[in-house]
Image (tube, grey):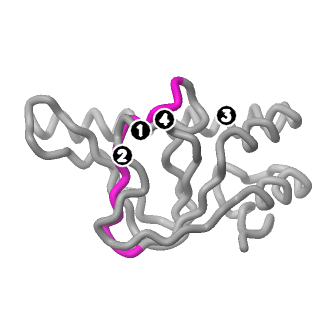
Amino acid sequence: MITSEVLSQFQLFKGLPESLLADIAAISEEAKVQKGGFVFREGEKADKLHFLLKGSVALKVKLTSRPESVTVSFVSSPYQSFGWSGIVAPYHYTASAECDEDSELLMIPAAPFLDLLEKAPVSGFKVMQRITELIADRLRNSRQALLKTL
């Protein structure tokens, strides 16, 4: 079971009030995905935010010019987040997440998570600022990876 103490180690949640972390912990779920398994696939409806606890996950996108997917980023350090599409409209995954090794994940259902952030607007603003940083970082990584395929 995930505790608020564990959540406080995630960059996304640093500095949030203990009460909010406890509420987030209460809705969180843990999962194990074997090497080669998909956490989610590009284009699927996104309804969760994901975090790596252990293992490695490759984020891949399909290109119309290639038959195989291109890896645009790796999530390989504990406490990194991915699958931000679950809390950003239009709520569809923009990449596939495939485990490079057996992995342990934390998943937070999007709807109740967004409800918690709405009830704590100052903390919610901090979290969403960090999400925009994550999106910008992934966009840079994706652009660099795609340019290498040309």
Q: Residues within 10 Å of mark 3 (few under 14, many from 20)?
A: some
Labels 1 and 4 touching (C-beta < 8 A):
no
Identify the disc placed on residue 41: 2
Q: Amino acid at mark 4?
A: Ile
Q: Position of residue 61 (x, y in %)?
A: 27, 40
Give residue 129's quadrant in the image. Answer: top right
Q: Position of residue 72 (x, y in %)?
A: 28, 45
Q: Secondary structure at mark 2?
A: loop
Q: Earlier in the sequence, mark 4 or mark 3?
A: 3
Q: Residue 128 — which label? A: 3
Mark positioned earlier in the residue sequence (1 or 4)? 1
First-in-chain label (4 vs 2): 2
For the residues labelled 3 and 2, the Cα–Cα distance comes to 23 Å
Q: Are marks 2 and 1 in contact (CB under 8 Å)?
A: yes
Query: Left or right: 114 with respect to 39?
Result: right
Residue bearing mark 1: 44
- The alpha-carbon separation of the residues under discs 1 and 4 comes to 18 Å
Q: Which residues are magenta?
A: 90-102
